[in-house]
Amino acid sequence: MKPFSLARPRDFAGAGKLAKDRRFRLPVIKAGGMDVVDHLKEGLIEPDLLIDVLRIDDQPEIREADGAFHIHANATLANIAASRSIARRAPVVAQCCASAATPQVRNVATAAGNLLQRPRCWYYRNSQFDCLKKGGHRCFAFDGENAYHAIFGDGPCHIVHPSNLAIGLSVCNASVRLTGSDRDAVSLADLFHMPDRGLLSEHNLKTGEVVTEIHFEPRSTSAFYAIKHKQSFDWPLVAAAAALELDGDRIESATVTAGAVAPVPWALPHVGEALVGVSLDDDTALRRACATSTRDARPMSDNEYKVRLLPVAIRRAILKAAGREVMS
Ligand SMILES: Cc1cc2nc3c(=O)[nH]c(=O)nc-3n(C[C@H](O)[C@H](O)[C@H](O)COP(=O)(O)OP(=O)(O)OC[C@H]3O[C@@H](n4cnc5c(N)ncnc54)[C@H](O)[C@@H]3O)c2cc1C
Ligand code: SF4
């Protein structure tokens, strides 16, 4: 590992200034460091400046104001999952945090770091594969081992978006507050981009922009459901977030997003439309609406199983949101 300087700015504005300081070739922001330190150890990045923002605690970790939740960029996944208020008023957000990683990771991992962690593609994570995402000329997953890759999107990179928190927030009209540029905020929907809009990064932050807070609206009838190899610590094979408006047992409106199936949180507005008017007691209609989730799927050689899992995860997220039994 090459030597680098370490800076501990007092606030996020200071971090933003350092991130665009031209004296440095590659300044990198570190929060909990779970992903950044992995990158350093694997030789995937060689910063000359590490900007440690973890000690910045200029706001409470979690607050409610103007009918919305405001989470500090450095709030840990553990504390978001443990917030009674979030669990009651936006259960999908508490659940997606509780479902991520292990207790040890959740105690350290921050909200902003979770949103902005890099993809898990094993070719990307291995310094010996110079793939498209690292400036190379080919995607090794496309005709290689792609069991954990995308079933949606046209490439040319086939990663799946890695953040549980982004999937949960995506059904809560979330936005991210910023410092370091001429804009104050960006909606969660505009935070990430597909690979055809840029391969070297997954988000739309400009150089020097730093996340200070995340805002989202309550969704009291909502849930997150992940299907994993090992429930204890794996990233999801497939995940779903659902937020419902119910009239008795009937769905009046539904917002559904799929996770671990596309390079960005994969919004499924047509599934929401198909769910309108469906009674939760009519399981045939519920399954039919959830099955529409895969109509545009284009699996690769090893991940056709995700096409079968996705409607299951969505149905279970819907039933969980409504407080129903899910394991059938
Ligand atoms: C065994 C294991 C299992 C895991 N399972 C899951 C899982 O199931 N679901 C899941 O979502 N995650 C999972 N993770 C990933 C883990 O949750 C993330 O690595 C972690 O959330 C990253 O947060 P951090 O604070 O450590 O970020 P860091 O590693 O410090 O930073 C990550 C990225 O965010 C950027 N960044 C951080 N803060 C800011 C800011 N304020 N403004 C701008 N940029 C910023 C950094 O520059 C970096 O690019 C798992 C990790 C492990 C080790
Ligand atoms: S999926 Fe993306 S990150 Fe993985 S090998 Fe292909 S180009 Fe690289």
Image (cartoon, rainbow, N blue to C red):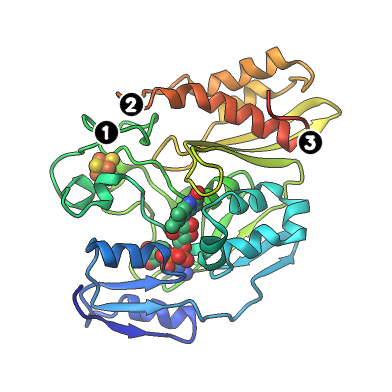
Q: SS for tag 1? A: loop
Q: Quadrant of the N terminus?
A: bottom left
Q: SS for tag 3? A: loop
Mark 1 closeness class: few <14, some 14–19, many ≥20 residues within 10 Å: some
Give, as a three-letter code, the residue at label 3: Gly
| Real-space Cα separation, disc 1 to disc 2, in angstroms | 7 Å
Residue drawn at x 43%, y 22% is 296
On screen, residue 168 above or below 237: below
In-image side of 328 versus 204 (left or right): right
The circle on residue 159 is none
| Real-space Cα separation, disc 3 to disc 2, in angstroms | 34 Å
Earlier-in-chain disc, 3 versus 2: 2
| Real-space Cα separation, disc 1 to disc 3, in angstroms | 38 Å
Mark 3 closeness class: few <14, some 14–19, many ≥20 residues within 10 Å: few
Comparing labels 1 and 3, the label whose residue is closer to the camera:
1
Per the image, the residue denoted by label 2 is 302
Residue drawn at x 52%, y 27% is 310
Earlier-in-chain disc, 1 versus 3: 1
- The answer to whether mark 1 and mark 2 are in CB contact below 8 A is yes
Give, as a three-letter code, the residue at label 2: Asp
Per the image, the residue denoted by label 1 is 145
Per the image, the residue denoted by label 3 is 323
Q: Quadrant of the C terminus?
A: top right
Residue drawn at x 43%, y 24% is 305
Residue drawn at x 69%, y 53% is 217
Residue 75's spot in the image, x, y percent? 59, 68
Q: Is mark 3 within 8 Å of ligand 1?
A: no
Q: Residue furthest top?
A: 284
Q: Quadrant of ligand 2?
A: top left
Residue 234's spot in the image, x, y percent? 48, 46
- The answer to whether mark 1 and mark 3 are in CB contact below 8 A is no
The answer to whether residue 195 of the structure is visible from this angle is yes
